[in-house]
């Protein structure tokens, strides 16, 4: 899945870079505010793709003394930065350009705009195809796209998908604004289209920021996965009761598990240690994404209480 995400990001960078240059040339030649907004949008998307690739690379750095659990959350941090850039640069500049065009309207031959927008729609559709193919690997059962996004722990897949979706919507809005302004001889439509593009980008940025914030703060595994972990623990012959079970994602495929277990009273310390090792092995085999397991064992004998803790990295 990581290779699919990387392919989608690289495809988006290549497409956005080529499209940005042609959009800006057309905007300069025609003076279209909507086209300039689209050019800014493509430049921002190109930079954002680079930031996501950088985040993926940083997140794979090995653990060290300062970061004993690794650098997995680097990916979540850079995804949040991408959302902020979409809002501030993409959305903000588009709204500003739209308002400026409405206050100082002017008209020009839109032929170049139509040509560039047509090519841009084709290239963005190709980029969207790669983004959706990467995202499709996370679609399971009867979950909707929004449910899958909420459950996803890999921001690269849905960030690129939402960027490409916003880009396609922006192109259609720009096309409509330029066309209506040309046919009705009313340049205000061009400026209005730019403002609508900015609002689309603002909405996408707010949604991506919300999702990235949750991942950065720390999200646990899905209820289904957590239930499976607890079932594995309960089914062990040495376990009397499973109490707390806490999880946190440090990356799309890196999870920490803290499990509090009460063992049966007749067991000795050696037997409990063996049971802990057995639980760690079974949980890791069933859920390989759980890289760090800490099990706290309680209640050993009726006349006295001992405690044993262990962890696997």
Image (tube, rainbow, N blue to C red):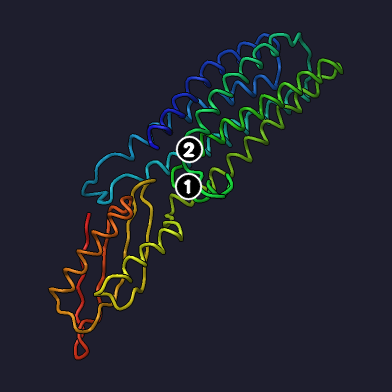
Q: Do the residues labelled 1 and 2 touch (CB within 8 Å)?
A: yes
**298 and 170: which one is in front?**
298
Residue 52 versus residue 241 in the image, above or below: above
Alpha-carbon neighbours of circle 2 within 10 Å: few (<14), some, or many (≥20)? many
**19 and 252: which one is in front?**
252
Mark 1 or mark 2: name the one nearer the start of the chain. 1
Q: Where is residue 65 in the image (x, y as percent from the top left)?
A: 21, 49
| Quadrant of residue 263 within the rendered picture | bottom left
| Quadrant of residue 106 within the rendered picture | top right
- What residue appears at the point 33 percent right and 34 percent down from the top-left corner? 57
Identify the element where label 1 is drawn.
loop
Residue 202 versus residue 170 in the image, above or below: below
Identify the element where label 2 is drawn.
helix
Residue situated furthest right in the rendering: 184
**77 lies left or right of 143:** left
Q: Where is residue 27 in the image (x, y as percent from the top left)?
A: 66, 14
Q: Position of residue 170 (x, y in %)?
A: 66, 28
**175 and 186: which one is in front?**
175
Query: Which residue is under mark 1?
Result: 152
Query: Which residue is under mark 2?
Result: 157
Alpha-carbon neighbours of circle 1 within 10 Å: few (<14), some, or many (≥20)? many
**108 lies left or right of 278:** right
Q: Position of residue 226 (x, y in %)?
A: 40, 62
**98 and 307: which one is in front?**
307
Residue 103 versus residue 205 in the image, above or below: above
Look at the image and tell me in which quarter the N terminus lies: top left
What's the CA distance linking mark 1 and mark 2?
9 Å
Residue situated furthest bottom in the rendering: 303
Look at the image and tell me in which quarter the C terminus lies: bottom left
- What residue appears at the point 42 percent right and 28 percent down from the top-left corner? 7
- What residue appears at the point 22 percent right and 46 percent down from the top-left corner? 64
């Amino acid at each position: 899945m990581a290779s699919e995400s990387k392919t989608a990001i690289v495809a988006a960078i290549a497409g956005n870079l080529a499209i940005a240059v042609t959009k800006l040339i057309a905007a300069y030649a025609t003076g279209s505010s909507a086209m300039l907004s689209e050019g800014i949008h493509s430049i921002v998307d190109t930079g954002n793709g680079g930031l996501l690739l950088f985040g993926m690379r940083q997140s794979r750095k090995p653990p060290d003394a300062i970061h004993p659990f690794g650098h997995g959350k680097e990916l979540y941090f850079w995804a949040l930065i991408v959302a902020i850039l979409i809002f501030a640069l993409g959305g903000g500049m588009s709204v500003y350009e739209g308002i400026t065009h409405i206050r100082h309207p002017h008209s020009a031959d839109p032929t170049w705009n139509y040509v560039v927008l047509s090519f841009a729609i084709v290239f963005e559709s190709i980029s969207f195809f790669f983004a959706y193919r990467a995202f499709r690997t996370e679609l399971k059962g009867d979950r909707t796209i929004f449910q899958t996004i909420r459950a996803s722990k890999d921001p690269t897949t849905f960030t690129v998908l939402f960027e490409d979706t916003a880009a396609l919507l922006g192109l259609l809005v720009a096309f409509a604004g330029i066309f209506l302004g040309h046919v009705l001889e009313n340049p205000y439509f061009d400026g209005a289209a730019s403002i609508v593009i900015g609002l689309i980008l603002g909405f996408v940025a707010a949604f991506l920021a919300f999702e990235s914030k949750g991942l950065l703060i720390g999200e646990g595994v899905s209820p289904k996965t957590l239930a499976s972990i607890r079932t594995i623990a309960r089914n062990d012959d040495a376990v009397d009761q499973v109490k707390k079970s806490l999880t946190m994602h440090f990356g799309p495929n890196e999870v920490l598990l803290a499990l509090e277990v009460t063992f049966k009273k007749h067991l000795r310390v050696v037997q409990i240690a063996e049971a802990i090792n057995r639980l760690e092995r079974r949980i890791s085999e069933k859920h390989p994404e759980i890289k760090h397991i800490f099990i706290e064992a309680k209640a050993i004998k009726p006349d006295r209480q001992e405690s044993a803790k262990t962890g696997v990295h």
